[in-house]
Amino acid sequence: MTAPATSQPPERGAPSARWSSVIVNVAAALAAHAMATAMTTRWSAAPTLTSIVATFTFAVIWMQGYKRAGASARVMLCEEWRNPLAWILTAGATMCGAFVISAVLDDADAFYCAPAVPWRIEVALLGSFTVGLASRIGTERSLAIIAYPLSLIAMLWIAPFYGYFSSAIFLGLSATARCTDQPLVQIAVVAAAMLAGRALGDLLARWLVKA
C-alpha cells in the first residue's frame, strides 16, 4: 500500500516564491509612490509630510503582503540581494508602474528632487546596511514582519528618497525622476552600494545571532 503523496514546500528561488516577493515589493513601492505623487501634485504637501505618509503607506502594504506570502517568498523578501532575477523584475516593474502613475497623476519630481534632501552614497549605504541587519535579526527571531517596516519608520523622513532602502525599488523609482543632480550613472552606483550594504548587514546579523 503506497503512502499518500505529501506536498513539499517550495525551494528558495522557486517561481511562485519569486513572483510573490516581487508582487509584494512592487505593490508597496507603487502604492507609496502614488501617495507621494498625489500629495505633491494635488495637495502641494510639504516634502517632510509627504515622506512620512509615503513611508507609512509602504510599511503597511508591505506588511499585509508579507502576511499573505508563502514561507519561501518571505525569505526572499528579506534577502533581495540573494536572488538576481527577483531583483531585476522588481526594478523593472517598479519603473514601469512609476511611469504609469506619472502619466495619470503627473510626476513628483518636486518631491524626489527636493534640494533639502541629502543625496549621498553614505546615506544609501548606511541605511541599506541597517535595513539588512534589522531584517536578518528579525527573521532569526520570527519578527521579520515588523523588522523591515520598523527600520524604515525609524528613517521615515528620508526613506522614500532612497527607495525604502531597497536597491531595486530605488533604481526603479529614480529612473523615472528627472533630477538634474542625479545622473543615471550615479543612480546605478548608489543602487549597487545599497545592494552591498544590504548584504553586509545581513551577513553581520547572521554572525551576531550565531556567535
Image (cartoon, rainbow, N blue to C red):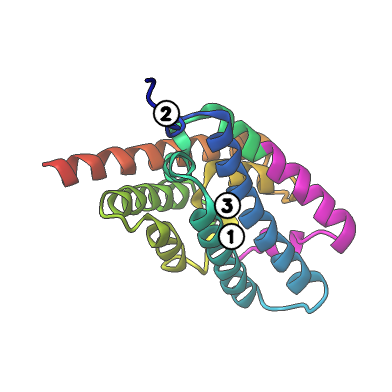
Q: Quadrant of residue 85?
A: top right
Where residue 180 appears, as percent x and y from the top left, is: 73, 49
Kindly identify which residue carries mark 1: 160
**Numbered disc in front, either 3 or 2:** 2
Task: Give me the residue at 45% from left, 62% from top.
Answer: 149
* In this rendering, position of residue 13 left or right of residue 57: left
First of labels 1, 2 by sequence position:
2
Q: Which residues are magenta?
A: 92-117
User: Which amino acid type corresponds to the residue marked 3 in the rendered image?
Assistant: Gly
Quadrant location of the N terminus?
Answer: top left
Task: Give me the residue at 42% from left, 58% from top.
Answer: 145
Q: Is residue 73 visible?
A: yes
Q: Which mark is residue 180?
A: none
Where residue 30 appears, as percent x and y from the top left, is: 69, 55
Q: Of residues 29 and 60, which is closer to you in this image?
A: 60
C-alpha span from label 3 to label 2:
47 Å
Q: Which mark is residue 163?
A: 3
| SS assignment at label 1 | helix
Kindly identify which residue carries mark 2: 4
Q: Quadrant of residue 44?
A: bottom right
Q: Is residue 105 magenta?
A: yes
